Image (tube, rainbow, N blue to C red):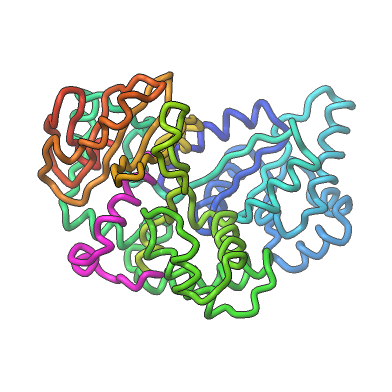
Amino acid sequence: MIPRTILPHIEHDLLLKPVILITGARQTGKTTLCELISKEYGFGYVSLADRSERRMARDDPDLFLKVHPAPLIIDEVQYAKGLFEAIESVVDKARFETGHNEGMYILTGSQMYKLMEGVSESMAGRVSVFNMSPLSMSELAGREEIPFEVDFERNIERASTLKIGVTEMFERIIRGSYPELYQKPGLKTSKFYSDYVDTYLARDVSEIINLKDKDRFLMFMGVVASLTGQELVYETICKAVGISKQTAESWLGVLRLGGIIHLLPAYNDRSMLKGAVKRPKLYFCDTGLACFLARVYDAETLRAGYLGGPMVETYIVNEIMKSYSNNTEDAGFHYFRDKNGNEIDLVMVRNGKLTLIECKAGISYDSGDVKAFGRLERSNYEVGPSCLICLTEKAYPLKEGVYALPITSI
């Protein structure tokens, strides 16, 4: 198993909370992680993907918990929403009788809406929630993962520990970041994603909405994948797929709840209200899945085509966000664009300062490529050290306080 950054944080909270909830898209490694915890800490394990177990959990959740006593890992818990109330009763009883109820249950699932709905209704204050992403670059490299900050000396040192050439980077983007692809090097990328999409449509999507036209939904996913790294414009999607705005909003909601896409909000503060775009930006959570759905199957085609830049940007933004979520830390992530087309790909708001980040698919850049950074000089926040992250192998300065950095510095 590839060591996961989030594991020590889960282990820490096992000592504090009765219930741990691990969410995330399919195939991000939740089950493998839980199997490791089960062996290390003596948890029982049951998956509601098993029909008989699912039936018992749905029909008689109290009996299910008696048959499977704590400490227990329940995989795919979204299939039996009634379990949440039963678990609440068990952990409250344990607290009343013994004074302790820490580390009783670990729940996993890939449908965020159903999971969080159950938590908010039944287990508020009793559960610690973790979102598991696909593998990060640092996890794949076996190096320590830390929340990304622009610190020139540390960035250079970090980049020196991992060398990834341009060709290899595009190959990584095509391959994606799901653990099975790296645990089984002989597994064909296209085969993995074909099976992934089939399972996602059959299980997750069908559980959330009554999907009558799977082919159109698949077309919708392909259109959205080709728009990764762009502003969310419903009219573009509706026209390409032949659906109403209401349907597009519903289907995008399904992709968000399944951990397939995320939306990056536009940066705005009172000093910027008049000139800033307010639409969010859309990103696929995994570039490999996005490339497959957009029908780009090899690194050479990606590098030469129009999706090369957006996919590199998507990869960089995802890696930065993983560096925080995997360490259970927060940063305010936004992007900025004004009515004149000045754009900053990523704006981080942290510790009372802004960090501005531009994402590029080339190697050589100059100060003109970060001129949009000047648009936030009159923001309410101080602008701290900022950067342009690209495919360069060596860092170099662009102007005072702004550096070009390799992707491996993340």
Chain part drawn in magenta: 293-320
Is residue 187 visible in the rendered image? The answer is: no
Asked whether 6 or 117 is in front, the reply is: 117
Q: Is residue 402 left or right of residue 325?
A: left
Q: Is residue 253 above or below residue 278?
A: below
Residue located 89% across and 27% down the image: 97
Residue 251: where, in percent of width, then height? 58, 64
- What residue occupies the far front of the structure in this picture? 274
User: Does 300 lie within the magenta span?
Assistant: yes
Q: Measured from the top left, where is residue 151 in percent x and y?
A: 26, 24
Along the line of sight, the residue nearer the viewer: 230 or 389: 230
**Residue 30 pos. (x, y %):** 55, 50
The image quadrant where one finds the C terminus is: top left
User: Is residue 10 shown above or below 164?
Assistant: above
Q: Position of residue 342 (x, y in %)?
A: 29, 42
Q: Residue at x 33, y 63 (%)?
A: 185
Which secondary structure class fits the magenta region best? helix
Which residue: 21% across, 69% down?
Answer: 301
At x 80% / y 41%, what residue is drawn?
A: 122
Indicate left or right for 42 with 86 as reference: left
Residue 326 placement, left or right of 108: left
* Residue 375 seen from this side: yes
Q: Nearer the viewer, residue 408 or 270?
A: 270
Q: Along the horizontal axis of the image, is 138 left or right of 271?
A: left
Q: Is residue 350 magenta?
A: no
